[in-house]
Amino acid sequence: MRMRQNVLVRVMVFAIVTAVILFAFTFAFTFAAASYTYTYTYTEGTAPILKVDNRTDAYIGELVKINISLTEAPGGVSGYNISVALSNASVAEIESIELPDWGINFLSKNSTMPAHSVWVRAIDLGMQIEENATNIPIVTLLVRTKSGGTTAIYISRLRIDDDFDRRIKPIIENGSISVSTSGSSISGFITYACNETGLAGATVNLSLSQSGNGNGTPTIKSTVTDSNGSYMFISVYPGTYNITASRRGFWSNSSSVTVTGAPASESYTLNLALWLKGDLNNNGKPADNADVAKMKNASIGNISPDWRYDLNRNGMLADAGDLAMIKDASAGNIVLE
């Protein structure tokens, strides 16, 4: 018991001594920081500037990078809270943000996007922005344009602190994005594969390609071919696009086209042919006796089938299901769609 009491006493003494030392250290550090004086003093007209980029030649559908930066920080930067907004939400929206290297850590936060305004907090945990730093990156906005026009990009709320818990009060230079309503055109003809005549009533969709891998993003423009099978998209801006044509009873077809310029008024042509489903001999008569014979020959390995022989879309060419479907279509029991 006495040994336990002695141990407890020693622990209590150690805790008290440790607390006194920590208090003394904290007081000394606080006093030193509080008594620190800058060697740099602002004079009229020399306050740092918080600059928001301008973009005057954006095009519809473009992802625009807008950099926000601080010209100088005599006392360094410890962190910030900033709210940025677009004045015209119909022209563009903030899709995402990119923090500078110094602000990437678990304490940095931002509000939900996409949105027409965003709140961002970044903390310089690694103390990378030291005294007398210049041209400090604050945040980069990734803004997706939606329609022609102009929107201001303005700072609605701001707090920036230096490394000594002192408020930095910069001059704010807001920015803007102007989106052009002009652009290039893509046009062409959708035709029957069997005779190359124009196919009226075909739906033609335009979508942006993703990383050149042929997979399209959601359709951004759509039209229907006229009586001659022609179509046209106007106000198309630089990028790689997928053009997809489809019509009931036909296999859809697609191809890509790259529009260059920034932007430029150029004309691009892309023609596509559509195959009738079940028209394996390409004579314009789907599921006739000759088509049934071709499907049967392919099913027993006498001829090599291609993608047109997968009528049930299960990835297996000329299987029993495909043969049954073309026989039913030939007999008028079903319509191949």
Image (tube, rainbow, N blue to C red):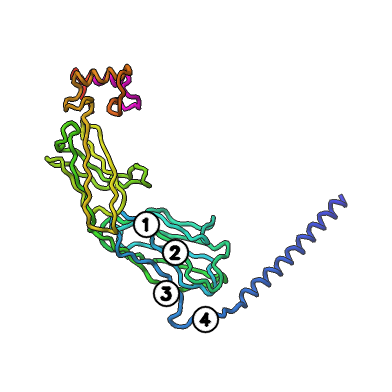
Gap between marks 4 and 1 measured at Cα: 37 Å
**Which residue in the structure is indicated by mark 2?**
82
Quick one: 165 or 323, which is closer to the camera?
A: 323
- How far apart in space, not on screen, are marks 3 and 4 (Cα)? 16 Å
Give the secondary structure at mark 1: strand
Q: Which residues are magenta?
A: 312-326
Looking at the rendered structure, the secondary structure element under dot 4 is loop
SS class, disc 3? strand
Q: Check disc 2 and report its element: helix, strand or loop.
A: strand
How packed mark 2 is, by other alpha carbons closer than 10 Å (few <14, some 14-19, many 20 or more), is some
Q: Residue at x 24, y 47 (%)?
A: 221
From the viewer's perspective, is the residue at label 2 or at label 4 nearer? Answer: 4
Could you tell me the amino acid type at mark 2? Ile
**Mark 3–mark 2 distance (CA, rounded to whole Å):** 14 Å
Which quadrant: the C terminus?
top left
Mark 3 vs mark 1, CA separation in Å: 23 Å
Residue that mark 3 sits on:
171
Reading the image, the residue beneath label 1 is: 94
**For marks 2 and 1 on the same chain, the one whose residue lies earlier in the sequence:** 2
Q: Which amino acid does the dot numbered 3 rest on?
A: Ile
Q: Amino acid at mark 4?
A: Thr
**Residue 254 appears at what percent x and percent y?**
27, 39
